[in-house]
């Protein structure tokens, strides 16, 4: 896979009063992620080529991918493919990159979601809705010790667009 | 949060955000196209938006690309919108959109 072909479709930034090491840990540990990622747990083998998996609360595989870049505690790039039938075949792979930088007393966390082709607004609405909630909840968790619970369902327009492309959604 | 409100208080800056909402990942040149603002004014407004964290930028090859960053707006929402109001607000927004589309 040629990562130079990927262009970011979503670039979100959040400032967190924490340390790069803690942010890195929160992004890569199942125990932390369960609290801010809609109950999903991140399991990652932190080496290039290692597996990256996000499991739903019932243990099912929601997202599967592999580690492309791993530079703790600064940068993590993974393939981030939602595990719905035919999704990767029809939409191509998704890359997610987390960049962690010290910014004064805080940490600037930048999330990039990149694709190797243009995806429509309907398809991207899932990430546009989900990421701000995930990042805000992660910030709360690191700053206050408790995450915000933000109830959220996949946007209807995204599900309709996926269905129209013949992608089965749960 | 003050700087977010200050940044949003200006119509030119809101129109830049609208353009980035319509299409993310634009260069300064692309953002200037068709605008009645000088390049310097756009640069200045973008800097204010970036300082308020409403715009994120990345380097992509030799280009600097600008993206709308909705995270601070989401945080404003979290502050004043209760958990159970969200679905109703989404429904109201959808109703407004459909009714206004029928009219136009």
Image (cartoon, coloured by chain):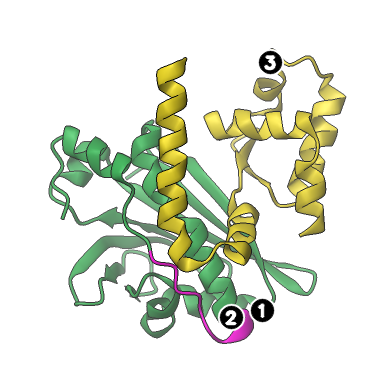
Chain painted yellow? B
Label 2: which secondary element: helix
Occupied quadrant, residue A22 = bottom right
Q: Do the residues labelled 2 and 1 touch (CB within 8 Å)?
A: yes
Say which quadrant the C terminus of chain A sits in: bottom left
Q: For the point 61% across and 41% down, which residue is it?
A: B68
Residue A146 on the magenta span: yes
Identify the magenta region: A142-151
What is chain A's hue in the picture?
Answer: green
Residue A138 rendering spot, x and y as whole percentages: 53, 72
Label 2 and label 1: CA atoms lie apart by 7 Å
Label 1: which secondary element: loop
Occupied quadrant, residue A139 = bottom right
Which residue lies under the disc numbered 1? A18
**Residue A68: which numbered mark, if any?**
none
A69 relative to A19, above or below: above
**Residue A142: which numbered mark, if any?**
2
2 or 1: mark nearer the eye: 2
> Crowding at label 2, few (<14), some or many (≥20) Cα neighbours within 10 Å?
some
Q: What chain letter is assigned to the residue under label 2?
A: A
Q: For the point 77% across and 28% down, which residue is it?
A: B12
Label 3 and label 1: CA atoms lie apart by 40 Å
Q: What chain letter is assigned to the residue under label 3?
A: B
Label 2 and label 3: CA atoms lie apart by 41 Å
A164 relative to B101, above or below: below
- What kind of secondary structure does the magenta stretch mostly adopt? loop
Does residue A55 appear anywhere in the picture? Answer: yes
Q: For the point 32% across and 58% down, which residue is it?
A: A153
Which residue lies under the disc numbered 3? B33
């Amino acid at each position: 896979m040629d990562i130079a072909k990927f262009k970011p479709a979503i670039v979100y930034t959040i400032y967190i009063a924490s340390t790069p090491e803690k942010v890195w840990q929160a992004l890569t540990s199942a125990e932390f992620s369960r609290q801010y990622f809609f109950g999903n747990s991140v399991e990652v083998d932190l080496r290039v080529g290692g597996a990256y998996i996000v499991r739903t609360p019932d243990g099912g595989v929601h997202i599967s991918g592999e580690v492309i870049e791993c530079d703790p505690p600064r940068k993590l790039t993974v393939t981030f493919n939602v595990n719905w039938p035919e999704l990767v075949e029809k939409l191509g792979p998704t890359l997610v990159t987390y960049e962690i930088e010290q910014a004064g007393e805080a940490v600037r966390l930048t999330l990039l979601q990149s694709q190797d082709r243009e995806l429509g607004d309907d398809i991207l609405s899932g990430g546009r809705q989900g990421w701000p909630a995930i990042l805000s909840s992660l910030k709360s968790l690191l700053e206050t010790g408790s995450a915000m619970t933000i109830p959220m369902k996949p946007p209807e327009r995204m599900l309709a667009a996926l269905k129209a492309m013949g992608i089965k959604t749960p | 949060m003050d700087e977010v409100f200050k940044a949003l208080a200006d119509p030119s800056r809101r129109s830049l955000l609208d353009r980035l909402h319509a299409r993310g990942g634009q260069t300064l040149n692309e953002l200037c196209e068709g605008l009645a603002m000088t390049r310097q004014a756009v640069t200045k407004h973008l800097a204010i938006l970036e300082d308020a964290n409403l715009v994120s930028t990345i380097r992509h090859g030799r280009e600097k690309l600008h993206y709308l960053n909705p995270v601070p707006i989401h945080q404003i929402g979290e502050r004043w919108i209760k958990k159970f109001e969200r679905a109703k607000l989404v429904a109201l927004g959808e109703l407004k959109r459909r009714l206004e589309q029928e009219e136009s």
